[in-house]
Every structure is written in C-alpha cells, then in structure tokens.
Amino acid sequence: MNVNGFEPKIVAFTCNWCSYAAADLAGTSRIHYPPNVRIIRVMCSGMVDPVYVLKAFEAGFDGVLIAGCHIGDCHYLSGNVKAQDRIATLRRLLHTLGLEDERLRLEWISAAEGSGFAETIKEYVGQLKQLGPSPCRREATA
Amino acid sequence: MAESKNDVKIGVYVCHCGSNIAGTVDVEDLTAFAQEQGSVAVARNYKFMCSEPGQALIKKDIEELGLNRVVVASCSPRMHEPTFRRVCEDANLNPYQLDMCNIREQCSWVHKNGATAKAKALVSAAIARAFYLEALETREVPVTSAVLVVGGGIAGIQAALKVADGGRKVYLVEREPSIGGHMIQLDKTFPTLDCSACISTPKMAAVKSHPDIELMTYSEVVDVQGFVGNFRVTIRRKPRYVDESLCTGCGICQEKCPWKAESEFDCGLGQRKAIYTPFPQAVPNVPVIDPEHCVYILKDGKCGACLKFCERGAVDFSQTEKMVEIEVGAIIVATGYDLMDPSAITRLGYKRFPNVITSLEFERLCSATGPTGGHITVNGKEPKSVAIIHCVGSRDEKYHTYCSRVCCMYALKFAHLIGEKIEGAQVYQFYIDMRCYGKGFEDFYQRASSEGVTFVRGRPAQVTDFAMSPEEKGKLVVVCENTLLGRPMRVPVDMVILCPAMEARADAKEVARLFNLSQSADGFLLERHAKLEPVATANDGVFIVGCVQGPKDIPDTVAQALAGAAEALSLIDRGSVKLEAATATVNEALCHGCGRCEEICEFHAPMVRLNGRLIPVSSINEALCKGCGACAVACPTGAISIRHFTLQQILAEVEALSGVPV
Amino acid sequence: MSYLYYPGCSGTGTGRECEESIQAVMRTLGVKWTELEDWNCCGAAVATGTSYLLSLALPARNLALSEKVGSDLVTGCSRCYLNLIRAQHYIQHNANLKENVNAVLAEAGIQYSGTAQLRHLLDVIINDVGLDTVAEKVTRPLDGLQVAAYYGCCQGMWTYAQFDSTEDPTCFDRLLAALGAEVVYYPLKQACCGGTLSMSKRSVGASLIGDLLLAAIAAEADCIVTACPLCMFNLNSFQNEAGRAKGTKFNIPVLFVTQLIGLAFGLPPKTLGLQRNIVPPEPLYRKIAAGTAVSSAEAVASGLK
Amino acid sequence: MAVQALAPRSEPVRVMKDPLGNSFEFCYQCGLCTASCRTAFAMKYTPRQVMNLLQLGCEDEAVASGSGLLCTACYSCTFRCPRGVAVTDMMAAVQRRNLASKHADSDIRRFYRSFMRTIERHGRFHEVEFMTRYFLPNPLLLRAEFGVGLHLLTKGKISLNAPGVKNPKAIAAMFRKAEEIEGRP
C-alpha cells in the first residue's frame, strides 16, 4: 500500500572513500534524486555502530542505508566485510522490534558510481513509500 | 577538555557559491534558521566563503567573538575541508573543531524542491556534531632514512637507483640469483628496437657499484612489522653455497660442473649447470648451487668438482639459510608479473607441437645470448612462415578479462625481427584490435605493415596439424575467421608464436598479505587511487610500481618506478610523518582486555597488555591506527571510541537530522 | 548401485545396434538398471528450432520422471544427454525459466524439482564400474587394432565437462586402451559430424562427414569408434555421399563404443548388433582374431569370421 | 546487382534476450565463434556476423539469411566465447524465426515440422511417420534418400511400430502450453 503523501525519511551512513564520494559525484554530474535522504559521513562502513541504526529508528527514520566500497576495494581492506557480517545479526534484532528487512539496507557504491547512488536512493524511496511509515514512528505519532 | 555547555560558541557560515547554492537554497532563511540553534554565537552567509574575504570573515569572528567551533555550510569537505581547517589554524583554533556541511554536491545540485528544508537538516546536524567536537593533536614521528625495494626487475632497479642517487640508503631484495627480471630476457624493445641487454646491463652494474645500495639477491622478504616511516623487515637469505666476498666470477666452476639442468632463464630451451649464473651478464656475477641438481648435495660428498677447481675456495657447502632484519622508512614493491602458461588452452597446441612457442621463448630464440645464438630455429629448422597469435588468455573471461597492453607492439616487433633474420619469411598477425596507443607506436605499426606482414583480424580457434590440402601437409594450420571478410580461414605455417597474458604473480596473494595491501579482481595489487595515487597504496609508506600493479610496457614501468622513488624520497626527506589524529582511543576504566580489538584490526594497532596496576587493558598504537573504527564497534564494553567520530557526535547528528521534516 | 536407463528414440530405430550392444555390454559388466518408464523424446536437435521452452520442457519431463524413482538417470546417446543436461543446467540457473517449464509440465501432470541425477554411459563405465573391471572382462584383447576415438562435438562441450576436460577429453582413450586397442592421434576427435544436416542440408553434412573419415584414414585407423548414435548414423550411412563430396571412396568401419567393448569381451557380433552396421565390420574381426592368440575353433564358436 | 546499404535499426531485437549466459550485446566481434564453427563456411552470415546484425538491430536480415539453419548446436562457440555470449542459443532463436517466416526453405521447414509433429503425436520419434510426412510432398528427396532408406530397412533399423508414450495427449498439451506461453516463434 502507498500511504497518500507519505514521504519516507532516510538516513544514509556513507563511507568517506567510496559512497560519500559517489554522492558528491551525483552532485557534480547534477543527477537529481529525492531529498528524502540525509547523509552522515563516516570513515568506513565498518565504523557504523548498531547503536546508530537503532537510534535512527528510535528518532523516527523510516529507512537506514549503509553504503560502502565494493568488497575488495575497502580503503581499510575489509571494513565493508565486517559491516556485512554485522548486518545479519542486526536484522534479527530489528525483526524483534517489528521492523521489516527492507528498512535496513546495505549497498556497495564505488566513488565512480554517482548515478548508481542516485538510482539507489530513488529506488529506496519508492520501496519505503510502498512499505509505509516505520512502526516505531507510527507508535510515536499514535 | 573541561568545557561546560555554555562555553561552546559556534559560528555558522553559509556559502552561496555564487548561484550554485543560493540558486536553489534560500540562504537567508537558512542563515536565520542557523542563528536560532543552541550555542550558535553567529551565523552569516557570503557569496564565496572559500575566497580571501570569506576566509577573513571567519578568522575575524573567531578572534573577536572568541568562537571555539566553526560550521561551514558549503561544498563537499572533500573539496574545501583543508582550506577551512587552515583558516581555523591561522586563527589559533584547533582545526578539528571545524565541521563542514555539504549543501552543494549533496543538496543544491541534486534537489529542486525541498532543498532548503534538507539544507536546514544538514546544518542543524553539523551544529549538533560541532558541539561535541574536540581539539585533537596531530602527532609526528621520525622516519627511518632508508628504503626497501622488493624485486630486482627494471622497475626495482630504476627505483633503487633513483632513491640512492638522492643520497638515501636502499636495500634491494631479489628472489632470483641475479637482478634483471623479465627485461633482461628480452632481445630488442619496441618501438625503438634498442637491444634490451644493452640498455639494462649498465643499470644493473650501476646497482652493484652504488655505495648506497645494499643488494640482496637469492633472498626473500618474510616479515614486515611497524608502520609508515618505521618498518622492520625480515629477509631470508637462501644459501648460495658460494661466498660472495671471495668469488671473482671467473666461471671455472660452471665450466667444470658435470651436472646439467634446464635453464630457467632460457625458458627451458637451453641448459645450465648445477652451479650457475642465470646468464653471462648476471649481477652479482656470483654463481649459486642448485641443490636439486647438485650431486655433491644430493649424494653427500660425491663430485665436488667446483670445490676442487675454485682457486679462491669460494665454494662453501656449509652455508645455511640466514635471516636478516633491517629498518626502513618506506617500501617499494616491484615484484612484477608472470607470463600465463598457454598450455591451459589446449586447442592452441602449446606443448603438443614443439614449433608452437610463447613470446618469451621467442625472445630467447632471437637473443644473441640465447640457446640458439640468435638464430630463429626449432629442431634446427628455420621457419619460412610464422603465425603470431595475439590476446592468448587476454580479453577472455575464461582466463583474463583485461588487455595485457604490450602484446600488439611486441608482436609487431617480432614480425620485424623475423623479417630481418629470415630472408623472405611470411609473417601473419592474428589480432582482434591493434592497440598502438603509445608514443611512436603508430609509426612502428606503419613500419611493420610496410615490411610485408599480413594482418588477419580474428581470434584463432585452433592450431592443428590436420592437413586438408597438399599445401597444409607437414605444417601447422591456424584456423580462424577473417572477420573483415567474414570468411573462415586456414593458414598453414612453420611456426606459431603465442602472445600469452601477463598475469599476477602466482604468489601475489602472499605478497599482498605480507605488505598489508589489497588485490584488485584481476589479482594484481591495488593502488590507492587509479588516477591521482597510482603508486601509493592503502598501506601508508608502501608503494607499488611496475607490473605488480597491472600489465605495463617498459616506459610505463620505469615512469612508475621513478614515481615510487619520488614518493619514497618525499616521505623520508620530510624526516617525520604526521599521524592521523582521528584515531581510536581506549577508556581504560571500561576496558576488560578481552582482545576483541586485537582480533578485528587489520593494522595490528590495538594491543592488550598489563597497565600500571597490572590489569590487562588494550592500548592503541596510534602510528598504526588508521581510524577505521572497526575496533570501536567490536568493543563489547564501549571502551574504544574513534576521535572525531565519537558515539556522541554521530548520535547527535542522527538526532538533529530527524528533527527537521522532509 | 542400480540406475534408470534412458534409451532415447534411436534405440528402437536408426540406432538399434547401439542399443543392443549397450545392453549386452552392461549385462556382462553386471550393471543393474531398469528402463525409465514412459520416457519421451528429448527433442533431439530439432526442438530448439521450434520452441526454446519445449527444447527444455521435453527433456525436463524425463528428468522429472527420474526424480520420482530417485536413482541416477543414464543415457548412451550424446544428443539426449546434451538436451537433458542443458535443461537441468538452464532451469537450475533461471528461476523464471523453471516456472515456465513447470507450467508446461503441469499439462502432463508432473513437476520438475531439480534433484535429478544425470549420468552418461561412459561416465558410468569408466568411473562407477571402473577400467580395472573392464580390463578383467577382456577375453579377446584388441592388440594391434588401430582405433580413431571420435568423441564428438556436443559431447566434448557438454558431456565431458561433467567428468573430463571440455577442451581435451581423454576418457575415451583410457577406455579403449583398457581393451588393448591402440588409440591413434585423431585431430578431429571433437569436430562436429553435422548432426541432422546430413538430412536437412546434405551438401554441407556430407563434406563435414568426409573430413572426419579422411582424418581417420590419414591416421591409419582400422575403424572409428563413437559414443553417439547420431554420429554413428551419419558416419555409417553417408560414406558414399561423403566420398562424392571429397572425390574419393570411403569404406571404413564405424563402431559404437560398446560394440568394440563387446568384441573385446568376446561377445558374439550378433548380440552386439554388428550385422546392422551399414559399413561391414568384418575386416576388424580378422584383425582382432589375428592380433590375439585364439584358436580358429574358438573364433568360429564365438562367431568371429 | 547493386547492394543496398545497411542502415542500423532502432526497433528492439526479438530474438531471446534472456538465455543462460550473455546476450549478443556483449560480443566484441573477435570471430572465435566462427573459427570454432564447422558449418560457418556454408553460411551467408557467419555466427559473428549474425551477432553483429543483431547488435545493429537488423534482425530480419539475419533471419532471412538462413544462417541459423546451419547451426548444428555443437556449442563449441558458446563454450569458447571470450565474452560469455550464448551464441548457440542466439543462433537457435534466429533459426526459429526463420522457420516461422516466409524465408524458410520449404524442405527444411517440413523436416522440422514433420519431426516435431511425430513427437507431438507419439511423444517419441517415429521413423515411418516422419519419413512419410517429410518425403511424400517431395518425391525428389525420397529418391535422394532411397539408398540410405533401403540400407536402414534391410538392416532392420526402421521400426514400423515404435511404441509411444502412454498418454500422447499429455505431450500434445505440453506443446500447446509452450506455444501459449511463448507465442511463436
């Protein structure tokens, strides 16, 4: 279902070396995408503490995107792999909170993939519109 | 830093960037919004914040209003963070108390509606984070004034010479008995056709005689400890069984040694003795004894011809493997490439037909120092017609998807050399695309074409000895499509030269692990940035040059070698290195010394040891720490945090971002 | 272990001698199998020309049938094997395809899950029975018999990928060597025989077959051995046409692999369907008899001569 | 006769774009497929050229050429292609469209149709029925094949009553369903 006029709020943790650079490239190439996403720059996707994700949902975000370098390209060799490993357990935790899998998303976007970044955001916003507001948020408003 | 909430004075500076930002974002509204945020002492906007007047504006406020935090809302920090950090420093504010807010690349340039709202969110987040920013000290450590060069091919040689000429100590480590690498195996070099040995042997000699170069051949790096500017390297020196200090290189031992083996240097086309130097111009000109073939070693004590005949008594079977430890400030990895073994592609007949050979084997056949003394013959027969097959194992997802970059050109060179050495020889080039992109390459292409070479555009499927016509009897037949005519072709020839892919060394993985580097998908080692950091790597102080990074011709290899030398020199000549200030730090009160951080860190920065009160706690070697944050997340007690990216700071950002509606 | 056997359409017709020899040899080797019940045509080389989906669904039905029983499905026909393994492979790697195929199979009241185990006759003989066992059964070694081992194309590309090298398979050579035969160097061992072109486009088919025969003769082979009924049919039936295409006359025996194994086992030619071979194989008998120390009495008894 | 200049087309190519492996777009025209092909010499357009025509959107040209009919599906090209293009499947798709088009050689079309018809009717191949369907409309063919036919008969290699599957209707139903899902070709 698509909640009328519902605008999902997304926070994106992007690694400084690839995905943040990709977002910059999307900018320099003037590739437009919905403003629903707010970016937080971290040095590495492996730096994203589960606490940040939980906080984000608690604070009322509808989706959390963690974006890093492609596997094998990590500036810190394997930070992205660590992030990947962590996501699984984190997902289980989110389940218990009644949050759907789609609300936490992991993407590898290289510094060269400006359009890729824009596409990801477009696609994700659409997906979250289908999904509707985050349960946490619904409770908050209810 | 004991600083109470109301001591914090934040200045917010919104940049118009001409119309780049102001055209989409309502900068006045944004400034007003910023002004209302807590702890904000002043909020201003200006046409170009990065300009002189813009910078002056900020400096003035810091000094006059006593700001202790600065938020600049403009372009990407990847663009101007260094600029504004300098501004802060000039005004005696710690540069780490600046936060940049990206409202151009990530806002005004990518949104129309909602740009201002988003800008507000971003600014509020920056302000929230700025509140928790701490002053950080960038530490400096001295640099060891010596460089390790790994690999004695043309890349390693050139890098070593350049660094040594700069007056710095160089250790050059080579696995083989002599330096020279692949280049010394080549006959002539394209496109200028100068003799490979003639141009590389002087360089090799220069290495030997250079006072600042310590050459270690027949040796391998086995361990690397430490960090940028301060590496501790362990080198294994294999027993040569010949005392380098005594040997005069007279060669009597090789003459008298009765035991033969296939010559690696001649690709197995020729033979060498059990005690040997790979080739006459070897550097050092000191033989090694190959324990696999020396009967004195195999059947203890029998033979010993070399012992008897060496007047200097340099032969010394009592030698054993030695470990040497050295300290260097920078490392240049130049371990080169392997040539793919084309027998994997059985249909091309390599190893089945003696007259199907690889490019390197052909180089040896052509070379005056080679097994045939420079006569192009197989089993004593001189070919009257030769097929040269390009892209063997290159540009082929079954083997290597990349282009090996040098084959087109040396294939043209081969055609020329054959024409030179064999009267009226017919040469066929089987190519897919002729890639002659380098300086003077196209001219060489033209020249070769004018010398009666036949070009057939098509990737051959097969090299067979099945004759379908009298002309094909007793010949090798190359089966392909002439793609320009769209006609299948069968070309009978006397010799086939395969141009196999240049591939990553078989032990590239171990090398990567040893020096803490990453490999790209094709197996070659990965540079830090494909364009702007071509020889630097993810591991500060370690540089990769030549074919270890990817297929290259000699000019490109040398250019990289010199770039590596420049990087190494600029690093050690600085005398000290600034260490990343945004590193991990341990709160001993919370640490249980569980060692989870030790396990997860790729850079061996954390180490658990007993503290003053003999409690096991983790401590971070800031010189090694890259500030990636892996340990902080892994730490079960939250004892570890990353400076400049603390839990507080990021949670504050999240909180603030959620505050402003989309 | 016991197998399910998929004879394929040629077994009752053009490939009858292949079928007969397969049965005879497997009996001798003590391999237990039952025929796949209610099997259907795999679509041969023709279904692809009509419908992509059918070219997968027809073989898939047989795979599905075998799944019900649960034992390995064996076939001695390369084309059948190719179609079966192709279907298995494609369906496994394309969910959408699997859906469509099962939609088609539903019409026949059956579904394919993907658990079927497919085996090639050679695979079973060489890797399950084992060459040692084969060698033990040899009573009339093929000493001095020069054989051109013709692997065939789709075999080379698909079959051998499963249990041998794709580009340069050798299992055939090993098998024939175990029989005492001398495998000659046959450069066209993986060149395609033209499949149905021999019928649908004679001029082309005949010339392809001609090359194969020429190569075998050039290699001084006494006979060609194949493991594919279609190759068998082509190389036997069109030697005149091939001769015309190449301006020569051909008369070289072409045997199905199990026919030659059978001879080495001393089985009577009739049980191996050798009388059905279009090019008379008799010259080989003499050669075999000569090459081995068998009394003419035995030879007569076993029908050699 | 003047050769008409070839112009690239924009309409989408209809041959199967979803084979296992890459589609023709990935082809870089090295010709390894053709070089590996035993029948390419007889094709108007070699496999590589067929891929090129598809890349140019000139599918009809490829279909009309009938090159697809000469593919024996030996898969050498597919297994060797350096870009992983499923050449064999592409050729088969072109072949399908040719057989369904006005360009089809009537004998070849009948060869395929007769073959599939016997399978549709019996679930298995049925020599006699096939031969009747295939040869009767063109007695010349029959004469050409007479020698072989005779051989087969005398050697007892033509079964006059080959058993079919238990329920041929089910097979026929499969044929219809496939057509319904795919449309033709």
Image: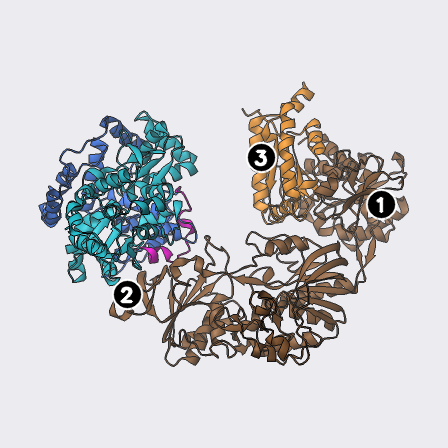
Chain colours: A orange, B brown, C cyan, D blue
Q: Is residue C84 left or right of residue D133?
A: right
Task: Look at label 1 and name its amino acid.
Answer: Ala
What element does badge 2 sit on? loop
Residue shown at the point (65%, 40%) measured from the top left: A82
Identify the residue under disc 1: B135
Q: x, y percentage for residue B351?
A: 42, 63
Residue span colored magenta: D18-37
Q: Residue A124's mark?
A: 3
Name the one closer to the observer, B342 or C200.
Answer: B342
Q: Residues within 10 Å of mark 1 (few under 14, many from 20)?
A: some
Are the residues at dot 2 and dot 3 in contact (C-beta closer than 8 Å)? no
Of the pair B3 and B358, the residue shown nearer to us: B358
Task: Name the quadrant containing residue C229.
Answer: top left
Q: Are marks 2 and 3 on the same chain?
A: no
Q: Residues within 10 Å of mark 3 (few under 14, many from 20)?
A: many
Which comes before the other along the chain, label 2 or label 1? 1
Q: Main secondary structure of the magenta part?
A: loop
Q: Of residues B313 and A75, which is closer to you in this image?
A: B313
At label 2, which amino acid type do we have?
Ala
Q: Give the Cα distance between marks 2 and 3.
A: 62 Å
Residue positioned 77% across, 50% down in the render: B580
The secondary structure type at the circle numbered 3 is helix
Q: Is residue D28 magenta?
A: yes
User: Dot 2: few (<14), some (14–19), or many (≥20) neighbours within 10 Å?
Assistant: some
- Residue C208 location in percent, x, y? 24, 56
> Seen from this angle, which residue lies furthest top?
A142
Residue A73 appearing in the image: yes
Image quadrant where one finds the N terminus of chain B:
top right
In the image, is residue B189 above or below residue D180?
A: below
Q: Chain of mark 2?
A: B
